[in-house]
Image (spheres, rainbow, N blue to C red):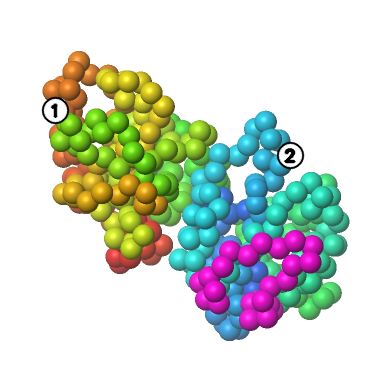
Amino acid sequence: MTASGRILRLDAAGALPADLRGGVVAIGNFDGVHRGHQAVLGAAAEIAAQERLPLICLTFEPHPRTVFRPQEPVARLTPAPLKARILKELGFDAVVEQPFTRDFASATAESFIEDCLLGALGARHVVVGYDFRFGARRAGTAETLAADCGHRNVGVRVIAEFDDEGGAVVSSSRIRSDLSVGDVAGANALLGYRWIVEGEIVHGRKLGRTLGYPTANMTLPHDTLLMQGIYAVKLARADGVAMPGVASFGRRPTFDGGAALFETYVFDFDDRLYGETVSVSVFGRLRGEMRFNGADELVAQMDRDSEEARALLSGAKPLSPLDARLSFGGAG
């Protein structure tokens, strides 16, 4: 990101730094930053480039459904820090996280335009999706936004729904559904990049090391979308270098059946990663989690899994320029 690269949070008195005001603002939750979202974000980037204006993303944290239905929180495809990193790769100068509270949601649509878009952001152009709603009781629509902003000399572009190659609307709910049944390929096709998990590498029981398969272990959120099983992956450290490997997400039924861990074996790698925050791009599902009759049987299957993962990864090509940067360590 330009400027300071900050994720900015606005309250009632907040305002953007002067060098970021007067820009093009893309608005949405953008959970997943999928291909449909990228159509909105790309349109904003196009306007900003043409008019040489700052490029800003306005998003909301936490997800509105989590505020109104806390008993059914949204399982996030891209937690806020990862979403901000993806937006940075798409060229955004800043990500503004508007705290989403019941008080904020109860404000009128007119006050959202006056206080947030014009007052805090000083927006010159706004880009939203066709289904954007805002203000108390979701009274504001993309159409009313265009009309109201037009009276204030603020440009508005509304982006139509984005369909996949089969004619179905690309949505975050479809991606969540695909991940929950292990259809990583389907989810990735909708995202336009390989789905990513991020986390700090923690100590485990070191069972993999005794089997010749030392793993980097991550504890994923309890509501993780991914179906348990074995996956071909690439792990990237903070320097962005992506290293191929194979990962197991599950409870180790051959040994302890304990709490679920995401355990990544990185091929041809002998460094320690404890305490580091890494990202893992998930390329494909190899099989489900299984219980074996002892360590020898397990190791033989792990050998086969590694061969299959190597083959899958060796033939993998970037799905998009964004995927090249996120999953291939800047390749492409």
Disc 2 marks which amino acid?
Answer: Phe
Q: Quadrant of residue 117?
A: bottom right
- Which of the image's four quarters has the C terminus? bottom left
Q: Give the residue at the far top of this rendering.
A: 293
Task: Give the numbered dot on residue 68.
Answer: 2
Q: Are marks 1 and 2 in contact (CB under 8 Å)?
A: no
Provide the residue designation for mark 1.
Answer: 300
Q: Quadrant of residue 23?
A: bottom right
Does any portion of residue 324 appear in the rendered image?
no
* Residue found at x 79% / y 72%: 119
Q: Position of residue 174 (x, y in %)?
A: 52, 40
**How packed is label 1: few (under 14 Cα within 10 Å), some, or many (20 or more)?**
few
Q: Nearer the viewer, residue 177 or 98?
A: 98
Magenta range is 1-23
Residue 9: within the magenta?
yes
The secondary structure type at the circle numbered 1 is: helix
* Most common secondary structure along the magenta stretch: loop
Q: Position of residue 166 (x, y in %)?
A: 47, 46
Does any portion of residue 108 appear in the rendered image?
yes
